């Protein structure tokens, strides 16, 4: 049985921050180690160069959500997209 796993990864777009580094490494390694499950990455800037990394991973999809305000993204956009 495979799972569909959704992750809010907008912090991967904040180049040079600790949260960015953590989020990028988490996504990179999860999707590299686990090709069985599907990963849906909820992003606020789908054109960010980092997401090109996943072009060759068929189990990863990029789904844009509104950037701001944050309360709207967290309480409305993410649940609606999920």
Image: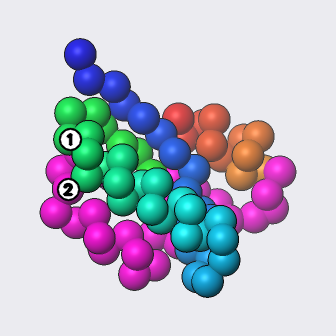
Which residue is depicted at the point 18% across and 50% down?
A: 58
Task: Give the colour scheme shown.
Answer: rainbow
Q: Is residue 11 left or right of residue 36?
A: right
Q: Is residue 2 above or below residue 16?
A: above
Q: Nearer the viewer, residue 54 or 46?
A: 54
- Dot 2 and dot 1 residues touching (CB under 8 Å): yes
Which residue is depicted at the point 61% across and 83% down?
A: 16
User: What x and y, as percent, mark residue 29?
Assistant: 35, 54
Q: Is residue 60 above or below residue 25?
A: above
Q: Is residue 50 above or below residue 28?
A: below
50 in magenta: yes
User: What x and y, as percent, mark residue 20?
Assistant: 59, 70
Q: Is residue 48 above or below residue 79?
A: below
Q: Magenta segment range?
A: 42-71
Q: Nearer the viewer, residue 50 or 63?
A: 50
User: Under tag 1, what secondary structure?
Assistant: loop
Residue under pointer 2: 57
Residue 28: name its quadrant. bottom left
Quarter of the N terminus within the rendering:
top left
Which residue is depicted at the point 46% across and 54% down?
A: 26
Q: Nearer the viewer, residue 24 or 48?
A: 24
Residue under pointer 1: 35
């Amino acid at each position: 049985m495979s799972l569909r796993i959704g992750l809010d990864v907008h912090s991967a777009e904040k180049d040079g921050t600790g949260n960015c580094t953590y989020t990028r490494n988490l996504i990179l390694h999860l999707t590299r180690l686990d090709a069985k499950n599907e990963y849906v990455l909820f992003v606020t800037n789908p054109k960010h160069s980092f997401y090109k990394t996943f072009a060759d991973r068929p189990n990863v999809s990029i789904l844009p959500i509104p950037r701001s305000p944050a309360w709207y993204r967290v309480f409305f956009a993410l649940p609606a997209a999920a």
